[in-house]
Image (cartoon, rainbow, N blue to C red):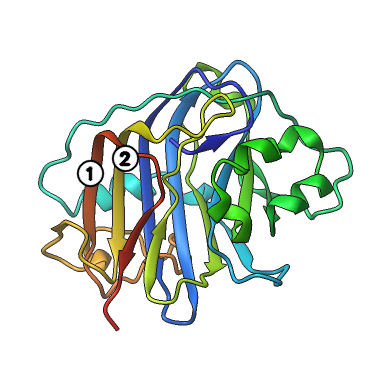
Amino acid sequence: MCCFSGAVESVTNTRIFARLTGKGSQFVVYQMRWKAQKPVAMILPIPVVQGKPDAVRFVNLKEYASFFEDLRKGFPVEPPTRSGGRGLKSFSKAADPTLPVEEVGDFVASFVPTVADFARLDPRFMIPKETWDQVPGYRRFGFTVFQLKAAAKNGASVHPIAFEFDNRMGNSLFFPTLHIHDGAVHPREEFDHMLYAQGVVIGEKTLQNAEKFVAIDKAQGVIDGKLPLTRKLLRGHLQNRDTIFAVSS
């Protein structure tokens, strides 16, 4: 589960991939199955380098909807997953936002450099400032905002969300796992996320490099074919925060 701007009945099968590029940036790929009666926005806080309007580059993986299914092929057994959650208030695409809005496959996406910059978007894009005040550490974060389209009404699954961002955390690999439900940030939440990574061992590791089971030509540089993958399951009533792994230099 992540942060939502609108009411979400359920979220299941959350999967996140992350990889540092070695050039000061990081890839994130995010996919889930959700159920909502109205269009909502998914908001992912990220530790971007401040003051750069181009600190985020979106990647269109519409032609690689099976991205996470292929990652799973590198591991012998896939643990069952389950997840659910609630959101805040409904959202729709702004008619003429000041911040750029991009079409990224089946999504509408935007990069919001700071909490204050949400004012430059239609108010329906945002989680209220009072909510972010509950987590003051996010004042120096940027935010990727994705419109989740009507295809999700019946729990449909769509292609993964993907982007590259300039990571100010150096050799730390960042996974956006903070939950926000109903305008409140609770100290602990129910987690059921499968995290995948390259470049750092976070748990179970594949015996082969990614090129043996991933369609590298479709991954658009997100995956390093010459590296194995590793994964970790976050499950249970856990501390509500993002997940960070230090990468040895």
For label 2, the crowd category at 10 Å Cα-Cα, with few meaning under 14, some 14 to 19 and many 20 or more, is many
The x and y percentages for residue 65 are: 44, 44
**Circle 2 — which element?**
strand
Position of residue 195 measured from the top left corner of the image (x, y, whole percent): 30, 50
Q: Nearer the viewer, residue 73 or 178?
A: 178
Pointer 1: what residue? Answer: 233
- Frontmost residue, 139 versus 112: 139
Q: Earlier in the sequence, mark 2 or mark 1?
A: 2
CA–CA distance in space, label 2 to label 1: 6 Å
- The amino acid type, in three-letter code, at marker 1 is Leu
The furthest residue to the right:
96
Where 170 sits versus 60, above or below? Answer: below
- Identify the image quadrant of the C terminus: bottom left
Whether residue 101 is visible? no
Residue on which the image places disc 2: 193
x 43%, y 30%: residue: 33
